[in-house]
Structure formats: structure tokens, C-alpha cells
């Protein structure tokens, strides 16, 4: 995924019907906050989320390691059903496994697993 320029708009405009950045989120429980962590060998964060959450609002943070610096990847409004139809998330009954992965270049993507296509949504860059 290292082919995207640093200033590329993320997520790409052609996927705005699946995932879009928002400036503010509704109050919980209508939104969620997740923190990914590079301490995991897989460099990912995933959870099961109900397909009945329409739309799904999420603030994604990322840590370079346990207890280390945390950066915001972004605040997102997502169509879980759309992501499922496009094969970016895995359907598990009435839920989807929403998985974010941080690539070695700092790009954060939604991706079922390494064999499926990835949807870039942001960056978590710890270089200063």
C-alpha cells in the first residue's frame, strides 16, 4: 500500500459511500472509540459490530506500543453493510468483523485479512 502519496485524501473520495471522515461524532452509545496498537504482531485492531448500526460512527486512535504515544487516525462515518457488500469486512451472522490494519508505512486500512483488498482510511505516523 506504499503507493499512496503523503497528501492523498483518505479515505479516497470514490469510497465516501462506504466510509467518510466527519468532524464530530454523536455521543456514546451512538459512537465508539477504538485504539489500535503496533505491539500486536498483526498490527491490527478488530471487533465484531452489529450490522444494525446504521450508520456506524467511530473514532480511531493508534499507539506505537503499549503505553506509548497515541495519535488520532480519524473520526469516521461508515456503512457496515456497504463495506460488507464490497468485501472489505467479514460477515459473521448479523455482525461484521471490522478490522483496521496499520501498514509499515503508517497507512491505516480497513481489510478483512491479508488476502483481501484494503481500503485506506488514514495514517498513523509516529515520526517526528
Image (cartoon, rainbow, N blue to C red):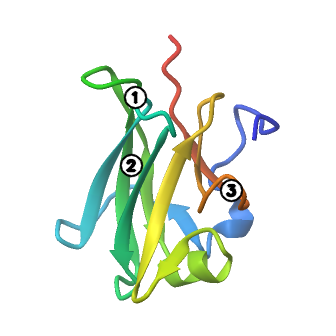
User: In 3D space, how far apart are the residues under numbered discs 2 and 1 (Cα atoms)?
Assistant: 16 Å
Of residues 29 and 101, the one nearer the viewer is 101
Label disc, if present, on residue 95 of the rendered structure? none
Count neighbours of disc 3 (C-alpha within 10 A) and say few if under 14, some if 14 to 19, many if 20 or more: some
The residue pinned by badge 3 equals: 118
Res 58 → quadrant: bottom left
In the image, residue 50 sits, relative to residue 67, either above or below, namely below
Q: Are marks 2 and 3 in contact (CB under 8 Å)?
A: no
Badge 3 element: loop
Label 1 sits on residue: 39
- Check disc 2 and report the residue beneath it: 60
On screen, residue 3 above or below 17:
above
Residue displayed at 29% across by 25% down: 66
Expressed as whole percent of the image width and height from the top left, the position of residue 112 reads 59, 62
State how far apart marks 3 and 1 are (Cα). 21 Å
- Which of discs 2 and 3 lies nearer the camera? The answer is 3
Which one is in front in this view, the residue at disc 2 or the one at disc 1? Answer: 1
Q: Residue at x 63, y 50 (%)?
A: 10
Q: Quadrant of the N terminus?
A: top right
Q: CA distance from mark 2 to mark 3?
A: 17 Å
**Which badge, 2 or 1, comes first in the chain's sequence?**
1
Q: Residue at x 28, y 54 (%)?
A: 33
The answer to whether 71 appears left or right of 20 in the picture is left
Q: Which numbered disc flags the more N-terminal residue, 2 or 3?
A: 2
Sequence order check, earlier mark of 3 and 1: 1
Amino acid at each position: 500500500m506504499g503507493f499512496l502519496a503523503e497528501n492523498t485524501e483518505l479515505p479516497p473520495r470514490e469510497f465516501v459511500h462506504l466510509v467518510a471522515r466527519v468532524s464530530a461524532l454523536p455521543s456514546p452509545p451512538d459512537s465508539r472509540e477504538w485504539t489500535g496498537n503496533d505491539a500486536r504482531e498483526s498490527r491490527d485492531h478488530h471487533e465484531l459490530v452489529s450490522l444494525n448500526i446504521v450508520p456506524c460512527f467511530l473514532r480511531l486512535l493508534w499507539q506505537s506500543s503499549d503505553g506509548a504515544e497515541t495519535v488520532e487516525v480519524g473520526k469516521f462515518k461508515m456503512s457496515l453493510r456497504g463495506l460488507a457488500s464490497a468485501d472489505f469486512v467479514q460477515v459473521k451472522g448479523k455482525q461484521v468483523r471490522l478490522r483496521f490494519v496499520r501498514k509499515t508505512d503508517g497507512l491505516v486500512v480497513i481489510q478483512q485479512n491479508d488476502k483481501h483488498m484494503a481500503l485506506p482510511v488514514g495514517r498513523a505516523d509516529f515520526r517526528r
